């Protein structure tokens, strides 16, 4: 009897896309982020993806000091894999974005594989009464260009790579897969490549099942068995995309960074609730959740 396939669940607990007055469940303070990460790990997430925020008004904060309080607590109370963002907020300069991961040398850091228009303004329809002016300005900005040039990507690779940090390669479209292929051919990244394909974020590829197939087919052709596939669906697409990909052999990412929902019109009460929901889907398919150590094995992490 074949052993059930292990599925790596990543939970992105707060991010820099959603803003505090959109959802009371969005972790803002360091202790809220620590509790959310530990809760997600206890619910079955092997990897937690972390951003920091200003505890006063919830603004994205990429200063290493902002990460210290929750990184310490998470390390004490959980053996989950820590993945620190290098995306920060799409409006931040690259030097600011890379600093926390350079400082803490995590097992994993996110790496965005191409520049793109970042359309947050659609969310204003769903959240017309944002409390803070900075939220309205940030979400309403139609000119956000998320810059990830070849030079900037190379800078992050050569800054973090020597620390043994490996990457969650965020690919928002097929061109980003080709960009990763280029860096692999330059010998700047080693397999297995942990490829996080992003669906339904405005400016990137759509959330249709054919988009999922297209990204996977392209990744299979470019990387064969040298990559570990994972998916994230933005907003209402989170669970449908996770279900499709889990059935197709993929790993999954959930969390309030990517979606505030737990079903049509039902807001998630916590990150752990989304991990529990995707766990039901995965186990319903006869698959099992990977433990943090199994994820370390599957992704060749430094531990
Ligand atoms: C769509 C996600 N916000 C991708 C992300 O998590 C980027 C990063 O932090 O580097
Ligand atoms: Zn992120």
Image (spheres, helix red, strand yellow):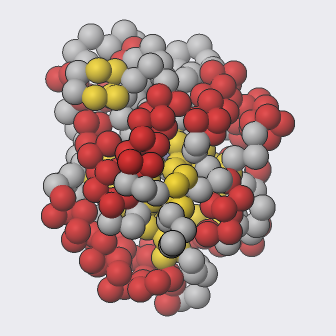
Q: Is residue 289 above or below residue 31?
A: below
Q: Is residue 178 left or right of residue 163?
A: left
Residue 109: name its quadrant: bottom right
Location of residue 111 in the rendering, given as x and y in whole percent from the top left corner: 51, 60
Number of numbered discs present? 0
Location of residue 24 in the rendering, given as x and y in whole percent from the top left corner: 45, 14
| Front in this rendered view, residue 104 or 81 | 81
Q: Is residue 68 above or below residue 26?
A: below
* Residue pictured at 35% horizontal, 50% vertical: 242
Residue 236: name its quadrant: top left
Q: Is residue 280 left or right of residue 67?
A: left
The answer to whether residue 33 shows anywhere in this view is: no
* Residue pictured at 46% horizontal, 84% vertical: 225
Q: Residue furthest right?
A: 76
Q: Is residue 211 above or below residue 207?
A: below
Q: Is residue 67 left or right of residue 197?
A: right
* Residue pictured at 46% horizontal, 43% vertical: 279
Location of residue 41 in the rendering, given as x and y in whole percent from the top left corner: 63, 39
* Residue pictured at 35% horizontal, 81% vertical: 220
| Front in this rendered view, residue 82 or 4 | 4
Q: Is residue 286 above or below residue 164?
A: above
Location of residue 114 in the rendering, given as x and y in whole percent from the top left corner: 38, 64
Quadrant of the frame with the C terminus: bottom right
């Amino acid at each position: 009897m074949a052993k059930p396939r292990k599925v790596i669940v990543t939970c992105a607990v707060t991010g820099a896309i959603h803003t505090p007055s959109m959802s009371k469940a969005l972790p803002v303070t360091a202790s809220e982020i620590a509790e959310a990460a530990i809760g997600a790990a206890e619910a079955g997430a092997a990897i937690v993806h972390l951003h920091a925020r200003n505890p006063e008004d919830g603004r994205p904060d990429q200063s290493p000091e902002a990460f210290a309080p929750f990184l310490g607590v998470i390390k004490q109370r959980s053996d989950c894999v820590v993945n620190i963002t290098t995306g920060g907020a799409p409006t931040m300069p690259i030097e600011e974005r890379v600093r926390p991961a350079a400082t803490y040398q995590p097992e994993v850091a996110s790496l965005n594989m191409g520049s793109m228009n970042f359309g947050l303004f659609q969310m204003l329809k769903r959240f017309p009464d944002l409390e803070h002016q900075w939220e309205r300005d940030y979400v309403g900005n139609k000119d956000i260009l998320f810059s990830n040039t070849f030079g900037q990507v190379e800078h992050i690779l050569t800054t973090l790579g020597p620390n043994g940090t490996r990457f969650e390669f965020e690919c928002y479209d097929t061109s980003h897969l080709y960009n990763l292929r280029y860096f692999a051919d330059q010998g700047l990244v080693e397999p297995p490549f942990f490829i996080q394909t992003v669906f339904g974020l405005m400016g990137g590829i759509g959330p249709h099942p054919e988009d999922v197939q297209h990204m996977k087919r392209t990744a299979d052709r470019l990387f064969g068995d040298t990559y570990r596939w994972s998916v994230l669906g933005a907003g209402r697409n989170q669970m449908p995309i996770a279900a499709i990909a889990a059935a197709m052999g993929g790993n999954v990412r959930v969390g309030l960074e990517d979606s505030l929902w737990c079903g049509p019109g039902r807001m998630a009460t916590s990150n752990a609730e989304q991990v529990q929901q995707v766990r039901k889907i995965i186990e319903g398919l006869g698959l099992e959740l990977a433990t943090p150590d199994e994820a370390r094995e599957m992704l060749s992490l430094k531990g």
